[in-house]
Image (cartoon, rainbow, N blue to C red):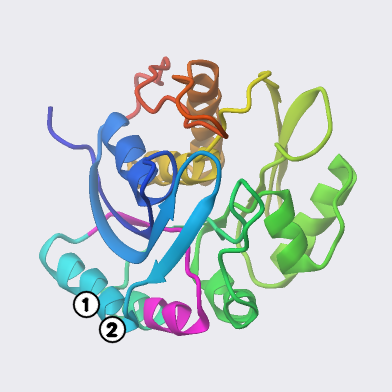
Amino acid sequence: MKPRSKILIIAGSDSSGGAGIQADIKTITCLGSYAMTAITAITAQNTKNVLSVIPVPTNSIKKQIIHTAVDIKPDAIKIGMLHSSQVVKKVLESLSQIKVKKIILDPVMIAKGGEKLIDDKAIQLVKKRLLQKVNLVTPNIPEAEVITGIKINSKQDMVKAGKKLITLGARNVLIKGGHLKSKKVVDIYLNKRDLKIFVSSRHNTKNTHGTGCTLSSAITTFFSCGKSIKSACELGIKYVNSAILTNPKYGKGHGPINHLNSILLDKRFK
């Protein structure tokens, strides 16, 4: 089977394999595309907590991006954890050099256990410069709250935060509603002209580690293969929901989802 597209992942590593660059690679591969990586940080973590985060030198991050992309030109880029302002700056420099048009940003800021994974200067740089460079940003509720300063307690608050992200320069926004206390999971997609609410069943499980990384990588894969941003979001949400439902129940904390799950994909996907 020939890969359908080539995707460069810029993100941190998860030693437990459920999130981060490991989840990204699994997702992209399982959906039929070719994954390349630029690792921004090495974490020691398991399903219960993050023990440590070791930054990769920023020049090394830039070299990974540039040296990979000049040889195998990516069709799309997925950006995950950028833990410091220096890393964000190097990524911005790299993006200006390699000029890839399709970019998805998952603004990883808070681990499943509540640990903060990014510093305040980096958050400000993401808001002021990186948001404008990407096609889609996919924050969960805590991340959307951090970026916008809006407290989110309802679907209406999610829409309000999404509109604030648009005013900050985002072209398209998908706010993930898994943290909202509701019977159904509500994810909200919007841009300046469109608003779409995706409603999914809420599965009674604590095994949801890596859902955000997986979703953004799935969206990037579908988008890289020609789907519209909105269609890519819908397909990505279906993939993640199926992965949660069939999770392998690994670990003693928030276990990983099942990247090997199969869903019925649109036959026109190519």
Any part of residue 102 in sight: no
Quadrant of the image occupied by residue 126: bottom right
> What's the magenta region?
74-91
The relative height of residue 46 versus residue 252 in the rendered view (above or below) is below
Taking 218 as reference, is 71 left or right?
left
Residue that badge 2 annotates: 59
Where is residue 40 shown, x and y percent of the image?
36, 67
Question: Residue 107 location, x and y as percent?
Answer: 56, 60
Do callouts 2 and 1 mark residues in contact (Cβ within 8 Å)?
yes
**Toward the viewer: 144 or 136?**
144
Residue assigned mark 1:
63
Q: Residue 85 placed where, x, y %?
A: 51, 82
Q: Is residue 124 something one can see in this rendering? A: yes
Quadrant containing the N terminus is top left
Question: Residue at point 83% right, 29% down?
Answer: 182
- Residue that appears at 36% across and 51% down: 21
Residue at x-position 34% and y-position 81%: 58
Classed neighbour count for the residue bearing mark 2: other residues with Cα under 10 Å, few (<14), some (14–19), many (≥20) = few
User: The residue under label 1 is which amino acid type?
Assistant: Lys
Which structural element holds mark 2? helix
Quadrant in which residue 191 is drawn: bottom right
Q: Amino acid at mark 2?
A: Asn
Q: Is residue 176 above or below residue 200?
A: below
Q: Does 94 appear in magenta?
A: no
Q: Say which quarter of the image contains residue 17.
A: top left
- Tell me if 99 is positioned left or right of 219 in this view: left
Cα gap from disc 2 to disc 1, whole angstroms? 6 Å
Question: In which quadrant will I find the C terminus?
Answer: top left
Q: Position of residue 230 (x, y in %)?
A: 56, 41
Q: Nearer the viewer, residue 134 or 93?
A: 93
Front one among 257 and 80 = 257
